[in-house]
Image: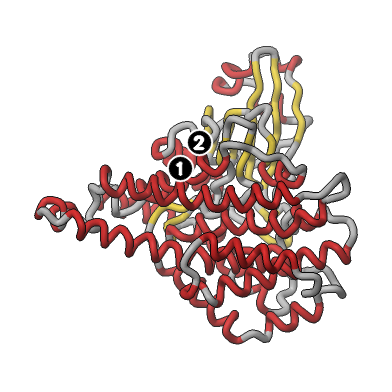
Amino acid sequence: MTGKLPFEALSVETLSTRLGTNEALCAKIGKDTTRWKVREVGDGNLNLVFIVEGASGAAVVKQALPYVRLVGDSWPLPLKRSFFEYHALTRQEARAPGSVPAIYHFDEGQALIIMEYLSPHIILRRALIEGRQLPDIARDIGLFMARTLFRGSDLSMVTRDRKADLALFADNVELCDITENLVFSDPYFDARMNRHTSPQLDGLVAELRADRDLKVEAQRLKHIFAANAETLLHGDLHSGSIMVTDTETRMIDPEFAFYGPMAFDVGMLLANFWMSFFSQRGHEQTGKRDAMRAYLLDVIVETWSVFRAEFSHLWRTERTGMLYQKSLFEDQGDRLGAEQALDHVLHQVWTDLLGFAGIEVHRRILGLAHNADFETIADEDLRATCEAKALKFGRHIAVNRRQIHSIDEVNTLATLIEQENSI
């Protein structure tokens, strides 16, 4: 199969025939297609995902569809998103080695990527719902974010290379459009594809959609998202885009990659830990989850601490781009000036990540694409209670982000809201 053939969606029945001569796949799993076992495991919103096992190994085949899988062919979507995912993965591997699956083959015409099969990894969100306390995720994710966000920016890259990369990813228009609407706008009015736990949340939803300060803040954050092409983002970094074992963490699915504000990835990721925190009460069928809640808050603190420390280290050792040049600071004997500039940059990331986190919480409860953290809570009244507390928390950190000064302050707020008997 070559990229010159017309696009055709794969299936369990056709995959071995169509990819049976693919050298990269055969080298990984074996040439005898009669021994291939194919299963479709895609449970996301957009794509087909197959695990292919052969005599000598296994691989993942991921193929984009010309529409949003969650909705159907009534919502067309270009196949080129696989192109951006492939290029994002190659850059992430270069900037944070070992943090993403290895790529074996990319076929632009068929919009498919053949990549490493991660086993016995599971999706982080599933692990958190099950109450698993993974020891390394905060360190691994904090390092990944700091390294990819710093090394993909004008703090590090050669200006010409960075601008060429910006031009390449600027064409990921349709995926950005999804974020710009589904994250920042649709949750705050009665958009057609919105849904929420009803009637339990109807009153609170109406209150949030009438909140002028919240809507203005959401649009200010959308403005930052659209206008601040600061670094190459993963673009969809959440607990469903991370695969884990007790000793390894890998980031997947960067098809939303584009150049945007550093704080976006960090805020989206931390929001998912906070949502997991608020959802734990709905998963206490086999016992209390107090220890799990404490663990999640510790993960949030450590992730931010690791991010800050690694970003600061890279600032001092790899700041070779055109921003905050050492020729203006260290080379002039002004190391403190460089540290002052670093504090300014990190403070801006901190302030904006709180806003992005609050908006992410809202869109996952009020918009189209919901989190399994809440959706797997069968008791609708209990689910609504967990969601209502998360919504209240999200509103507070988004609107008051400039007055919040530490991660401990945010976690204290989350704890107080979670312990409330009424909403």
Figure quadrant of the N terminus: top right
Residue lying farthest to the left in this orientation? 332
* Picture coordinates of residue 257, whole percent (x, y): 50, 52
198 to the left or right of 157: right
The kind of residue tagged 1 is: Leu
Q: Is residue 281 above or below residue 88?
A: below
User: Which colour scheme appears in the figure?
Assistant: secondary structure
Residue at (46%, 57%) from the top-left corner?
171
62 to the left or right of 92: right
Which of the two residues, 92 or 292, is positioned nearer the viewer here? Answer: 292
Density class for disc 1 (Cα within 10 Å; few <14, some 14-19, many ≥20) is many
Cβ atoms under marks 1 and 2 closer than 8 Å: yes
Which of the two residues, 238 or 26, is positioned nearer the viewer here? Answer: 238
SS at mark 2?
Answer: loop
* Picture coordinates of residue 399, whole percent (x, y): 55, 77
The kind of residue tagged 2 is: Ser
* Picture coordinates of residue 234, whole percent (x, y): 50, 50
Q: Quadrant of residue 126?
A: top right
Which of the two residues, 113 or 153, is positioned nearer the viewer here? Answer: 153
SS at mark 1?
Answer: helix
Counting residues from the start of the chain, the first of labels 1 and 2 encountered is 2
Disc 1: which residue: 143
Image mark for residue 394: none
Q: Is residue 92 visible?
A: yes
